[in-house]
Image (cartoon, rainbow, N blue to C red):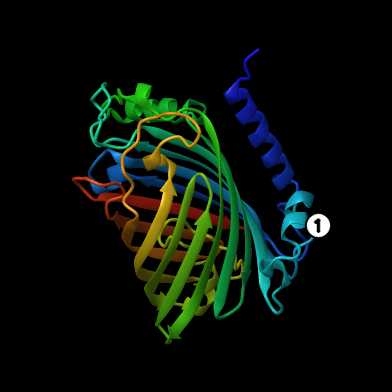
């Protein structure tokens, strides 16, 4: 009997959610929940990276990681790593369940578009470990997921387009095959300069995995109120999510502008399946990103609005990728 990839994925995700949800509270701190929507329709087009939807939950206010606030397998893997052993740090743990949808630029075409990347859907779970102080933020992330029909991307896009009256996507017969993927990434952000109402944050990231491998660096300029308290909630890539790991942030707001450059070694949404034949196009290894937006903190709520512009991610691309992001978070 052939294994059912959808059933396998559902079982795996269910086990991960149960395991992590049981560790999502800790007496030393509080919890948070956020929901993020990314969509290119916010910026006036439909195609390329077309949609991303994610929910994140977790616990802040931790002094150390332990089996009281982490699943046992995560604690066993991370207990001797820098994220756990650095002294004098506040800590937090969070988890993300997300779906992302990538399509060619013209979704009305049913035949294979040879010179553009394939249709690709991703369903993923990520576990994040955070360690931070007033000057440096570290985050270590493990992502496990599945690309292909079992990701549910085709059905999700069809439902959304039926509701919004958008064009019917007709090329999903040419999507990637089912394949499990993983990625391990480490982020670091540091406060390079700070004034009362303005600061400058440098950041770097290294990631490796069958999903995507990259080396990135960049800088973010922020202007606003209570910037010192919101520093630990900054994320990389910038402007893509609200991550309220500080938990105790007072009311505040800020505007931000970010520039990021990176070398991408592999990207399954461009390169195609790793272990089976599928459509692909040549990856553009050197890439860059601009992001601008605003973040508002009010009592227990936080809201992020941003616009992102990315350079070509494959050779011969005729237009830049651009999309908008909306994220809402609640701390408890």
Residue 249 vs 264, above or below: the answer is below
Instruction: Say which element carries label 1.
Output: loop
Q: Please provide percent x and percent y for residue 189.
A: 50, 72
Residue 144 seen anywhere in this rendered image of the structure: yes
Q: Please provide percent x and percent y for residue 158.
A: 37, 25
Q: Please provide percent x and percent y for residue 63.
A: 74, 71
The foreground one among 295 and 150 is 150
For residue 138, which quarter of the picture? Answer: bottom right
Q: Residue furthest bottom?
A: 195
Can you identify the residue that label 1 sits on? 68
Residue under the image location 50 percent in, 77 percent down: 190
Residue 20 vs 303, above or below: the answer is above
Q: Please provide percent x and percent y for residue 211.
A: 49, 45
Residue 249 seen anywhere in this rendered image of the structure: no
Tell me if 122 is positioned left or right of 280 in this view.
Answer: right
Q: How many marks?
A: 1
Tell me if 141 is positioned left or right of 312 in this view.
Answer: right
């Amino acid at each position: 009997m052939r294994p059912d990839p959808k059933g396998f994925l559902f079982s795996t995700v269910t086990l991960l959610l149960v395991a992590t949800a049981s560790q999502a509270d800790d007496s030393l701190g509080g919890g948070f929940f956020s929901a993020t929507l990314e969509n290119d329709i916010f910026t006036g087009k439909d195609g390329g990276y077309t949609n991303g939807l994610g929910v994140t939950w977790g616990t802040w206010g931790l002094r150390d990681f332990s089996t009281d606030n982490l699943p046992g397998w995560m604690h066993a893997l991370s207990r001797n790593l820098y994220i756990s052993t650095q002294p004098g740090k506040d800590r937090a743990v969070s988890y993300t369940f997300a779906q992302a949808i990538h399509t060619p630029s013209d979704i009305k075409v049913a035949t294979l578009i040879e010179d553009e990347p394939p249709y690709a859907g991703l369903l993923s779970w990520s576990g994040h470990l955070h360690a931070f102080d007033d000057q440096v933020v570290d985050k270590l992330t493990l992502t496990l997921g599945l690309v292909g029909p079992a990701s549910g991307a085709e059905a999700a896009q069809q439902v959304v387009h039926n509701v919004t009256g958008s064009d019917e996507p007709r090329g999903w017969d040419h999507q990637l095959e089912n394949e499990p993927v993983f990625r391990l990434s480490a982020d670091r952000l540091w406060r390079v300069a700070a004034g009362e109402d303005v600061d400058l944050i440098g950041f770097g990231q290294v990631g490796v995995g069958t999903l995507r491998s990259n080396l990135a660096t960049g800088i973010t300029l922020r202007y606003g109120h209570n910037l010192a308290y919101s520093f630990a909630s900054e994320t990389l890539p910038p402007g893509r999510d609200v991550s309220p790991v500080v938990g105790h942030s007072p009311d505040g707001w800020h505007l931000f502008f970010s520039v990021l450059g990176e070398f991408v070694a592999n990207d399954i949404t461009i390169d195609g399946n790793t272990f089976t034949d599928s459509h692909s196009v040549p990856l553009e290894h050197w890439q860059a990103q601009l992001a601008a937006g605003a973040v508002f903190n009010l009592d227990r709520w936080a809201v992020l609005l941003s616009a992102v512009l990315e350079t070509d991610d494959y050779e011969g691309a005729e237009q830049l990728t651009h999309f908008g992001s909306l994220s809402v978070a609640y701390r408890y």
